[in-house]
Amino acid sequence: QQLTGTLKNIKETGAITLGFRDSSIPFSYLDDNQKPIGYAMDICYKIVDAVKKELKLDKLEVKLNPVTSSTRIPLLANGTIDLECGSTTNNVERQKQVAYTNTHFLTASRYVTKKSSKINSIDDLKGKPVVSTSGTTNIKQLTEANAARGLNVNIIPAKDHAEAFLMVETDRAVAFVMDDILLASLIAGSKAPGDYVISKDAFSKPEPYGIMLRKDDPAFKKVVDAATAAVYQGGEGQKIYDKWFTQKIPPKGLNLNVPIGPELKNEFAKPSDSPDPDSYK
Amino acid sequence: MIEIRHVDKWYGPGFQALKDCTTSVAKGEVVVVCGPSGSGKSTLIKCVNALEPFQGGEIILDGIRVNDPKTDLPKLRARVGMVFQHFELFPHLKIIENLCLAQEKVLGRSHDEAVAKAEKLLDRVGLKEHARKYPAELSGGQQQRVAIARALAMDPIAMLFDEPTSALDPEMISEVLDVMVDLAREGMTMMVVTHEMGFASKVAHRVIFMDRGEIVEDALKTDFFGSPRSDRAQKFLSKILSH
Amino acid sequence: MIEIRHVDKWYGPGFQALKDCTTSVAKGEVVVVCGPSGSGKSTLIKCVNALEPFQGGEIILDGIRVNDPKTDLPKLRARVGMVFQHFELFPHLKIIENLCLAQEKVLGRSHDEAVAKAEKLLDRVGLKEHARKYPAELSGGQQQRVAIARALAMDPIAMLFDEPTSALDPEMISEVLDVMVDLAREGMTMMVVTHEMGFASKVAHRVIFMDRGEIVEDALKTDFFGSPRSDRAQKFLSKILSH
Amino acid sequence: MFASFDFDVIRRSFGYLFLDGMTFTLTLTGLSALGGIIFGTLIALMRLSGFKLLGRIAGIYVDFMRSLPLVLVIFWFYFLVPYVGQWVTGASRPISVGAFTSALVTFIMFEAAYFSEIMRAGIQSISKGQPAAANALGLTYAQTMRYVVLPQAFRNMLPVLLTQTIVLFQDTSLVYVLSMPDFLGAASKVAQRDGRLVEMYLFAAVVYFAISCIASFGVRRLQARISIVR
Amino acid sequence: MNYNWNWSIFFDPAPGGTGTYFDMLLSGLWLTIKTGIFAWIIALAFGSIIGVLRTLPSKTASWVGFAYVEFFRNMPLLVQLFLWFFVLPELLPRSWGLWLKQLPNAPFYTAAIGIGLFMSARVAVQLAAGIASLPRGQKQAATALGLTTSQAYRYVLLPIAFRIIMPPLTSEFLNTIKNTAVAITIGLIELTGQARSMQEFSFQVFEAFTAATVMYLLINIVVVTGMRFLERSLAIPGYIAGK
Ligand SMILES: Nc1ncnc2c1ncn2[C@@H]1O[C@H](COP(=O)(O)OP(=O)(O)OP(=O)(O)O)[C@@H](O)[C@H]1O
Ligand SMILES: Nc1ncnc2c1ncn2[C@@H]1O[C@H](COP(=O)(O)OP(=O)(O)OP(=O)(O)O)[C@@H](O)[C@H]1O
Ligand SMILES: [Mg+2]
Ligand SMILES: [Mg+2]
């Protein structure tokens, strides 16, 4: 059978390129030796093994290429990277441009506040300054909720997560709306983790994260999907999950302490690349 | 009118530009200052209206001590007209505005008064029809005549000239010298740095010869041209008159 | 040696700087060009060694047509020495390097040869001990003498001078004129734009008077100073000689 | 806020910040300045060449580059250079050039626009008589430029060139869009990963300030020394 | 390239229900223009004051000018904005800090002032150079007419200096507009920020950045044309800068 697309390329060049993020803890980030590590990286290496096996290669070189939120799409499109290993939300709009393999994480949009500010529900945010990171699905949901519920909050866009969190830390905003897992890692890394609390209320249902690959490359997608499904279903997925979310992680030995939830457990049993949150019930 | 007494001036700590200079200019007198380049002629003349500060001695102008900290320098300077080698007209102002600016801002004359005065003076130097032009649109000789008119507009009690013709084309020198000769004949007190010995012998009462910051010779015109006493002055004269 | 025939030159489409100029300079002849500012003197002299292109007529230099597209201009220019009003020494090079640059790069002389030649010429203009200085460390008169030496270093068949003394202090003019007088006496072919009528009457064979791009007068020295034929030349002479 | 300052984060990342980050920044600055000045000089010569078309092309290039934010230029070049490489070499797939080469090309092209304006001013600041004198001695156009005009223009403009290089030094931080480890990028990566923004940015401010001050002090010294020769 | 071009994306509704993606970019453009102009006014005002300080003879004044320029010039803009926004309020007394943080539109004002101060250092350097490039005689001529120092600056030096530095000022104006893109650091979502948001929502990266690029080109063409027009209408007839 004739190889096409990405597989053909990998075979010809003997190399596969992974795109990584530099500070997306614990999915994909640099340790103190500037080596990219993380939950998504581990899964990607499993995929690489499967590709190597599929193509019957003795040696498959793995190249690593840093990406940012602005460069990940063009780099994927022009063939610089073959997989994006990070924490990219999988949704319908984005599926027009790229494909995702089976979901590796589910996270809902929540907010963090200082305990001292005594915010107990979304309605307590009324009229207050609330920050979120610009260009994320979270700020989109916040804007929509703001209009729908008449919250009248003052939405402040921030450049990145760390700066958004700093706005809460320095009292420029009372709350920071973001994926709850990212909030957990920001709190864990902060100077006084005890001062902060993540809300019970959510702005969204748990939404899927996926590893991105090029659209319209069914042969490659088939290999990648099979590889991830095997990892999740074979119990290896759970082991990797525990390594990054319930144990100490480099570089500072933080422990996020977020045990696996029922939705993700379900998904691991029945892997899916659906962008629809409802399908993960 | 102008008393210069034992003036010493240093540029920075190392270089003495004027050494114990003493001379005076009486009312209505025309004094020509000459000497080799770098001898301090410009410096001396700039000290007279305090454009350059000096460190020793004193200069008294119409009874006022120039180097007195209490002296209102802008007011004093307004009473002495000064004409520079490179004219220094203000290029962004029309000729008439060049003449009116200081009249209005310093003397506080009304605009109409200033314009009337300016037009009278422009007429006098033969440039009435150029009043609405910009300086760059005039020839060098014309620009220098405007500069003289600008100084005269302040009704000065004395005029200082620093090589007023040396940046001019040979043909235009005489236009400017003619205006200066007229001024001298009308009794204006004048101190003129120049190498135009023709002008000196025609209108100067006295000639001062400077060398290395010192006044080497200070003599009546006839004495100076007749028999300059110092070697240096003799050599200088012979060189500039040889061609 | 230099033949100028019916030369027309325009700056841009609108302005004609030279109108049908015809004259010639024989070997060993000294010609002085004078005239009011803007009359085209500099333009004419620059056309001779093709520093300015011209549109009509022709100039023949030592048998070679300057305005022939086939002429190797750099080579031609190297054979004519030119001295500018503002010296135009290269300020970033030492005096000796100023003299050697073109000898080595254009004539292809060895460095030692060039230095030897340069030192001989510096000695001749009385500046041997200044060889290792930079131009800015010399006075104007010294700089102009270096400029003459630099031109002579190329062993030119003729020398062009464009107001070589008009940017100098009066005292220094004579130093430079003395060098030029010597050159003339040794039989160098020279074309000199100058207003130094003393120099003209001493060494020129012919005087050319220009006005508005035209050669108005082209006469033997004695005829010119005796009785210039045109009104314009008469007026001009009277003005520049009056002071 | 300052009571709880965490200097440990700086200590732990010191090697990364300086061995990787600062080395990268200084290399990129140095090579870009060199390339920018060479290309800038060529562009300036094009603009002053007297050939209308050549001058216009150079003029449009300069205006175009100067109208765009550097961040966008970096972004575009990163994605266009491989295709340009493919087109030039006629290869079958885009030439992957690597982020550093791409950034270097971008900075050289972008800074060339600025340097060309400086060099143009430098060349124009030299009196017309200088090239005329060189021509009159028989030097060709190339020789005149090489031995007479450019050495002086360069000397006159050295302080301005160095000032622009200091600006360039600060601007290299914009390669963060390509996620490259320049000094500021490295600092902000560590800062974001560890949630220590304030410490890191303050530290970066001090480092940039110190280096720029040393450089501009050097510029002043140099200016004083050069002005003696004139 | 495996990329799904979709130019009609601009007319799709953007998330947040405030209109299409095009409207989103337009609002960013408007913020860029507003911030740019506000910052430019600050840069001009402070730059002029500091630029003048740097040219005054007083040691203190020039030291203040020097320190100001070094301070604002030697840190990357990104870092400066971060410090003003996040660190400054913590250094102030608590109540002031709180007041600052609760100001509505704090990112806009911080960005405008921060960019303004950053650029003012460069404007100051340009202006000081412009003033220094005027012939020394201009200030002396103004002073000799009796104008005070501030009058001399107001009526003579600044009007000429600003005309001379018009071209570099145009560049600095462009830089100010471009530098607003850095303000994303403190949450000011101007044109580049909106393009980035658009690309994250829709994943149509190239379309978003193409639109931003074109918009920047358009603003800058308008600015350049406007400044050229201003330059031409302020040009002094016959005057060539630097002469
Ligand atoms: N601002 C200054 N700082 C330092 N030295 C100066 C300054 N102005 C003039 N000098 C020096 O002071 C000396 C006298 O200068 P001045 O201008 O008075 O000479 P001058 O007789 O007018 O010469 P010239 O005929 O060339 O105009 C010169 O050696 C000059 O170099
Ligand atoms: N490059 C140029 N472009 C346009 N016009 C020029 C140029 N050079 C000279 N001109 C004009 O050509 C005319 C003749 O100039 P030229 O320099 O030959 O005069 P000149 O007789 O040497 O005058 P001067 O005594 O002032 O040196 C003048 O009107 C001048 O304005
Ligand atoms: Mg003088
Ligand atoms: Mg001339």
Image (cartoon, coloured by chain):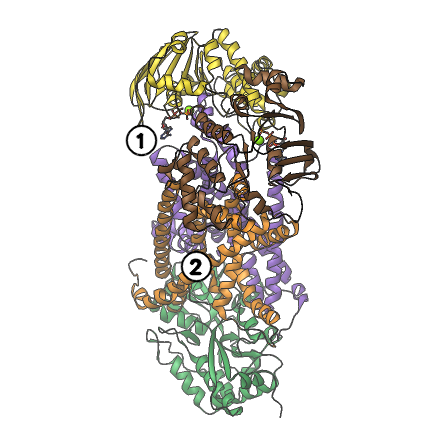
Chain colours: A green, B yellow, C brown, D orange, E purple
Q: Is residue E139 above or below residue A113?
A: above
Q: Secondary structure at mark 2?
A: helix
Instruction: Tell me residue E5's x, y (percent).
Output: 65, 70
Image mark count? 2
Instruction: Tell me residue C220's x, y (percent).
Output: 61, 23
- Identify the residue under disc 1: B12
Report the quarter where the N terminus of chain B lies.
Answer: top left
Q: CA distance from mark 1 to mark 2?
A: 40 Å
> In the visual, does C98 lie left or right of A11?
left
> In the visual, does C56 lie left or right of A52?
right
Q: Are marks 1 and 2 on the same chain?
A: no
Q: Amino acid at mark 2?
A: Thr
Which chain is home to disc 2? D
Q: Residue at x 60, y 34 (%)?
A: C45
Q: Amino acid at mark 1?
A: Gly
Instruction: Tell me residue E85's x, y (percent).
Output: 42, 54
**Which quarter of the rendered image does ligand 1 occupy?**
top left
- Identify the residue under disc 2: D29
Mark 1 C-beta to ligand 1 under 8 Å: yes
Q: Is residue D162 above or below residue B144?
A: below
Residue A233 versus residue C113: which sits nearer the camera? C113
Instruction: Specify few, some or many for label 1: CA neighbours under 10 Å numbering under 14, 14-19, or 20 or more.
Output: few
Name the mark nearer the viewer: 1 or 2.
1
Residue D193 versus residue B91: which sits nearer the camera? B91
Which chain is home to disc 1? B
Q: Is residue A195 above or below residue A210?
A: above
Residue C124 versus residue C142: which sits nearer the camera? C124
Instruction: Tell me residue B27's x, y (percent).
Output: 41, 7
Q: Secondary structure at mark 1?
A: loop
Residue A114 shows up from this direction: no
Residue C171 versus residue D230: which sits nearer the camera? C171
